[in-house]
Amino acid sequence: MWAYTVGFTVLPHVGGFLGWFLNRKEIPACYASYLVWNDLGGCSSKAIVPLGLYGAQLVLNWAWPPLFFGARNLNMALLDILCLDGLAVGTLCSWYRINRGAALLLLPYLGWLAMATCLTIRIWKDNPEHKSGKSD
């Protein structure tokens, strides 16, 4: 049974890994946070706000699935994703002054967040009995 679990967990990542592996020499280092970090000279005092915003939104991004799926706390999940939206937009604005390319790399993420936010709001509105958390 564990082989199936591992297989179905690993399988979705195989294509992405192969794509990276085959094209790794063709693609320069284009991780947005790295670009900003590098342009600011590493962990300097100038990096506190831009990378702090990035770190804060990353924490809220990680917190959303356990709130939404695990705890089924729709109020907290909605609050989380709305704060996440604000921090992500703040990150983009902060990064735009430092490295426009890095800021533009956040646009697909903001599109995904917009969709996730709309879904969260819709589910929150449609499930008033679950807004306070688990009812099981």
Image (cartoon, rainbow, N blue to C red):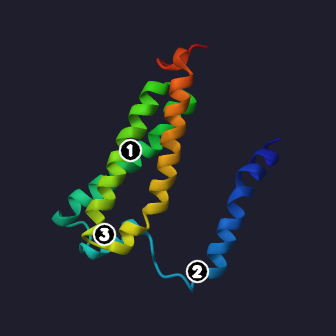
Place of residue 24 in the rendered image (x, y in percent of width and height, measured from the top left): 58, 80
Q: Is residue 119 above or below residue 111?
A: above
Residue at image coords 28%, 76%: 39
Q: In which quarter of the image is the N terminus?
A: top right
Q: Which of marks 2 and 1 is in front?
A: 1
Residue drawn at (81%, 46%), measured in percent from left and top?
Answer: 4
State the residue at coordinates (52%, 52%). 112
Residue that mark 2 sits on: 24
In the picture as drawn, the residue positioned furthest to the left comes out as 45
Which amino acid is tagged 1? Leu
Q: Residue at x 42, y 28 (%)?
A: 76
Q: Look at mark 3 in the image and give the residue it sits on.
A: 37
Mark 3–mark 2 Cα distance, whole angstroms, equals 21 Å
* Residue 72 seen in this snapshot: no
Give the numbered dot on residue 84. 1
The reply, left or right, for residue 49 in relation to residue 136 is left
Q: Residues within 10 Å of mark 1 (few under 14, many from 20)?
A: many
Q: Is residue 15 above or below residue 65?
A: below
Circle on res. 22: none
Q: Looking at the image, do the residues carrying marks 1 and 3 touch, with CB atoms under 8 Å apart?
A: no
Q: Circle 2 — which element?
A: loop
Q: What residue type is labelled 2?
A: Arg
| Label 3 with label 2: CB-CB less than 8 Å | no
Q: Which of 61 and 82 is in front in this view?
A: 82
Query: Judging from the image, what secondary structure is the residue with disc 3 in?
Result: helix
Q: How many labels does the image show?
A: 3
- How crowded pointer 3 is (Cα within 10 Å; few <14, some 14-19, many 20+) is rated as many
Q: Residue 59, located in which quarter of the rendered image?
A: top left
Pick whichever of labels 2 and 1 is earlier in the sequence.
Answer: 2
